[in-house]
Image: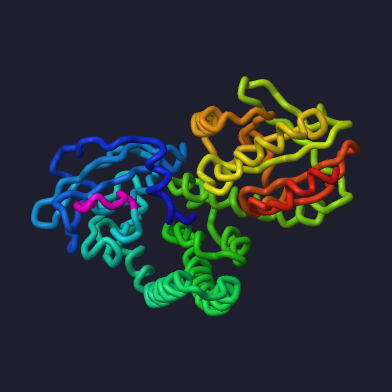
Amino acid sequence: MNWKNTLSVCLLGAGLLSACQGSQNYQLSGTIKGVPTDSLVMCVINLESMRTERIDTIPMQDGTFQINLPDTVVKSVSITSLPADGKPLFSDRLGTMELLVLPNERITVKGTLSDYELGGSDFYIRLNEVRKLLLPIMEEVTKLRVKYEGLMQQELDKDSLSQAYIAEYAPLQKQLQEMALDYIGQHPDDEVSVYLLSYLGENMKQGLQYINDEVKNGRMKAYYQPILAIYEARKLREQAAEQIQPGKDAPVFTANDLNGKAFSLTSLKGKYVALDFWGSWCKWCIKGFPKMKEAYARHKGKVEFVGIACQDTEIQWKAAVDKNQLPWINVRNADGPDISAVYAIQAYPTKIIIDPEGKIVKVFVGEDPDFYTFLETL
């Protein structure tokens, strides 16, 4: 599982709280150098519920901090510096330390927010040794990213740069995958192996098969299950991609609308339908709404629009619909078969036009102006 954007998720679920003070037997402690203020900011996500539990400020003294996270659930913890210059709280410039915190285990960290060593209980000692093995390649990946981010800022051909980046990144990615898979294969009963599943990419199937039942169903289950779900959704997308083509039958689905009532795609049989796969977190989705609303007003009665919110909580979804005043049918992709996987959605927004017979007419990936031009031709 990639927790790169964990802190952005945290902002959606909590406000800053004062730091927790508990017993002196701290579960998480460390010494961090290079922090410009005397405080850190910590975001905690419960991996069992996938909800943000808290965002706390953590006071430091001479670069050291300590905190308790009493619970019986695996947590994702992200720590960054409290900025002193008014810059965005979770900007990449500040650096972010991303930790997996297991219940009843002690973890220590030492270094900087972007370069640190783990210590404490056996799990973290083993994890630190594995991180050392992967670190040289990870550093090359970071250098590569920084290099191409700099080039992207210049007036250069971005398509060519993207292709060049992929060409250089691919062999590094393959090395990481092979090293992680090798460790998992040799340590199928180690909880660290579950953590390494997130590195596997195309080797995920083999890695999942290596992990023994006791580990996958133990306390790492909250980490293992989302990875398994992502893998199964990817398989479903690959299978669905062959079906999501012009002239093919559009997969039917049922999902709850804003009032909690079940909406079925079959209820619109006999009409043109435009499905819009979006999310409240997707800036291009939001930017496209004004033009979508214009098109909806112009074609209402001829084409039914159905917004399908993906990767959103119910609260986030309803708030975004209300804020943007979306007048069409709105449902959320949750509590059932993954509609985005069934429709092989790879990017957001994606719009799909379905004809009155229930067949796919055309697929538009991204906020594509051709979608609106095509509507005029129907």
Q: How is the image coloured?
A: rainbow
**Left or right, 181 with reference to 306:** left
119 or 7: nearer the viewer: 7
Q: Residue at x 17, y 44 (%)?
A: 25
On the image, the x and y values in percent for residue 256 come to: 66, 27
On the image, the x and y values in percent for residue 198 come to: 50, 59
Predominant SS along the magenta part: loop
Q: Is residue 85 magenta?
A: yes
Report the label total: 0
Q: Is residue 337 magenta?
A: no
261 or 102: nearer the viewer: 261
Q: Residue at x 82, y 52 (%)?
A: 243
Whether residue 133 appears in this view of the structure is no
The correct choice, above or below, for 157 with respect to 338 in the image is below
Q: Residue at x 42, y 60 (%)?
A: 192
The correct choice, above or below, for 95 with respect to 221 in the image is below
Quadrant of the rendered structure where residue 355 is?
Answer: top right
Q: Residue at x 31, y 50 (%)?
A: 88
On the image, the x and y values in percent for residue 4 come to: 43, 56
Whether residue 7 appears in this view of the structure is yes
**Quarter of the figure with the C terminus:** top right
Residue pushed farthest left? Answer: 62
The region drawn magenta spans 83-90
**Left or right, 92 with reference to 255:** left
**Left or right, 195 with reference to 246:** left
On the image, the x and y values in percent for residue 133 come to: 38, 74
Quadrant of the rendered structure where residue 253 is?
Answer: top right
